[in-house]
Amino acid sequence: MLPGDGVGSEVVSAALLVLNAVKKKHNIEIETEFGDAGLNCISRYGTNLPEETVRMLKKSDCALKGPMTTPEGSNSETSAAVKIRKIFDLYANVRPVKSLPTVEGIKKSIDLVIVRENTEGLYSGLDFRVNEDVAIAFRVITKRASERIGKFALNLAEARKRHLTIVHKGNILKESDALLRSSIEKQGKNYKGVKIDDAHVDAMAQWLIKNPELYDVIVTENLFGDILSDEAAMLVGGVGVAPSANIGEKFAMFEPIHGSAPKYAGQNKVNPIATILSVKMMLEWMGYKGAAEDVQKAVEKSLEGGMKTYDLGGKRRCSEVGRAVADSI
């Protein structure tokens, strides 16, 4: 468990209440250990991801990560999350977008998942200054990464509503997005029961607002997925209720999609539901399906009972929501 920066310790503490409750109910043995990572580590360790934390992660099955502050500007530290993704090759970023009871959203029946390729694109780290007047970033798309994320998204679509939408900008990025799209479509030939279509990213940005119920699994590259998934979170109540998973072949990291919100740190007011639902995704990944379902039901029951933080129009505290979900379990 990596609490991170700002409000991280508060939302992770609330999520730990829920994890402990579901462990007790389902008699699950999960050992938890806390590690240091984030901006708070730089003054103490000279890095936002200390070697001791990396060693701890390598001994673990998975990680629950709180939000972390990433410094901006030239020569600043790469984000701790990106470092962990690279170390463990967490190639699939999975962000479910689902309507919740009593939470105001753009529509009431939204249930989709955005699958984002997590290792390349414009986030490959090939970003540099040529001189004072010119900076260049390379957008890297490979057949291997595209086929791998395509297979992951197709497996997910096959288990859901059997509909996959490939998002790209192939009319402008003619070579890189042609490779992305064709690689995924090639994988799709092995999934006869899954309907595959595609959309340009700018069109998808508007269709998510107008007709989000038309989509099931959306797969795209790194930058597009980052932006679209934040937009999609606002359709169902905002980033405070939006969980995510970073999944590789042998390791996974789960985290809320929101930032560290330092101005709210220590106020016990932020919404822990995104982190709690990230615990749900972690339990699913571990194979504890019944426990994961209990977390989802408890979140919904708590919301129906009025357990809403300020971002959802309520007055409940972060810790109160965590305790209510745990008590419901």
Image: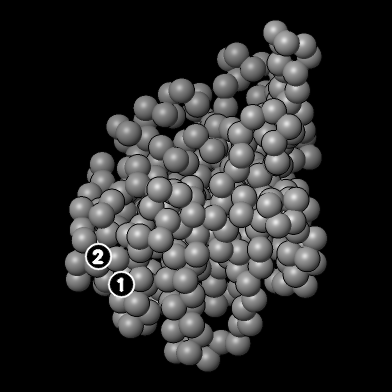
Labels 2 and 1 touching (C-beta < 8 A): yes
- Secondary structure beneath dot 2 equals loop
Using the image, tell me which numbered label, if any, was put on residue 143. none
- Regarding residue 152, the answer to whether it shows in the image is no
Q: Residue furthest top?
A: 133
Residue indicated by mark 2: 316
- Residue at figure coordinates x 40%, y 61% from the top left: 266
128 or 279, which is in the foreground?
Answer: 128
5 to 220, vertically: above or below: below
Could you tell whether 168 is left or right of 305 in the image? Answer: right
- Secondary structure beneath dot 1 equals helix
Using the image, tell me which numbered label, if any, was put on residue 320. 1
Residue 224 x/y as whole percent: 55, 32
Residue 62 x/y as whole percent: 66, 67
The crowd level at tag 2 (other Cα within 10 Å; few <14, some 14-19, many 20+) is: some
- Residue at figure coordinates x 35%, y 71% from the top left: 319
Residue 10 x/y as whole percent: 44, 65
9 to 106, vertically: above or below: below
- Regarding residue 143, the answer to whether it shows in the image is yes
Identity, as a three-letter code, of the amino acid under mark 2:
Arg
Q: Residue furthest front?
A: 43
- Residue at figure coordinates x 20%, y 53% from the top left: 313
Q: Locate residue 173: give its quadrant.
A: top right
Real-space Cα separation, disc 2 to disc 1, in angstroms: 6 Å
- State the quadrant of the C terminus: bottom left
Identity, as a three-letter code, of the amino acid under mark 1:
Glu
